[in-house]
Amino acid sequence: MLMSKEKPMADLGISKIEMAIILPGLRKRLKRSLPYGNLDPIEGLRTVAWLCKKISKASNKEYQPLFMAWEHAMNKTADLLVKEDIMAKFELGITMGEITGMLPELLAEAWASYNDDKKISVDEGILFVSVVLDQMAKAADDTAVKDFFVAQSAALAALAPFFVEEEVVEPE
């Protein structure tokens, strides 16, 4: 489980020295994100992506895929905003027939999660949303939109393992 009262979450494994090395670069990037005193959303996303990449490189191996997936998701979101000239107003390019075509795979995924104990756990729910995003990526027409959905799906899939509940064995 991600947050537990019994057992604190493990740390990322990043030392104060490593953070002291990262922070000046973050300050520079943030200054660049605020060219006229207002936050530029694209540069802001790229700054968050840069920070995720730095944290990934400095963190324990178990957290690296999560932060790399977030970095990729932030960059793909920024790419989509650049393509659509900020405040993305884009066509998904997904027809009603394609949405209907997604239903069997989505139903199969939901049933696989539901089947084991008649309840969908948090990690299974996150993975289900990831599958929905994958299906949206397959159906989207525009490459930038496809990349956006793939990146968001991967970021969620990387997050799901941190919500897996440990089985509690009760003493007899």
Image (cartoon, grey):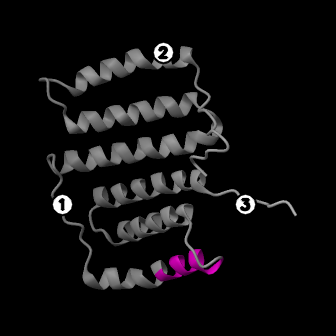
Horizontally, residue 9 falls left or right of residue 33, namely: right
Q: Quadrant of residue 91?
A: bottom left
Magenta residues span: 107-116
Please name the residue shown 23% across and 27% down the image.
33
Please name the residue shown 20% across and 49% down the image.
83
x and y percentages locating residue 14 in the rendered image: 58, 25
Horizontally, residue 140 falls left or right of residue 165, namely: left
Q: Residue furthest left?
A: 36
Please name the residue shown 28% across and 44% down the image.
78
Residue 167's label in the rendered image is 3
Q: Nearer the viewer, residue 90 or 55?
A: 55
Residue 21's label in the rendered image is 2
Residue 90's label in the rendered image is 1
Question: Most prominent secondary structure in the magenta stretch?
Answer: helix
Per the image, label 2 sits on a secondary structure element best described as helix
Can you say which quadrant of the picture contains the C terminus?
bottom right
C-alpha distance separating marks 3 and 1: 44 Å
User: Which amino acid lies under the numbered mark 2 shown in the image of this protein?
Assistant: Ile
User: Which amino acid lies under the numbered mark 1 shown in the image of this protein?
Assistant: Phe
Residue 114 among those drawn in magenta: yes
x and y percentages locating residue 74 in the rendered image: 36, 44
As drawn, 159 above or below 46? below
Question: In terms of sequence position, does the residue under pointer 3 or pointer 1 come before the other?
Answer: 1
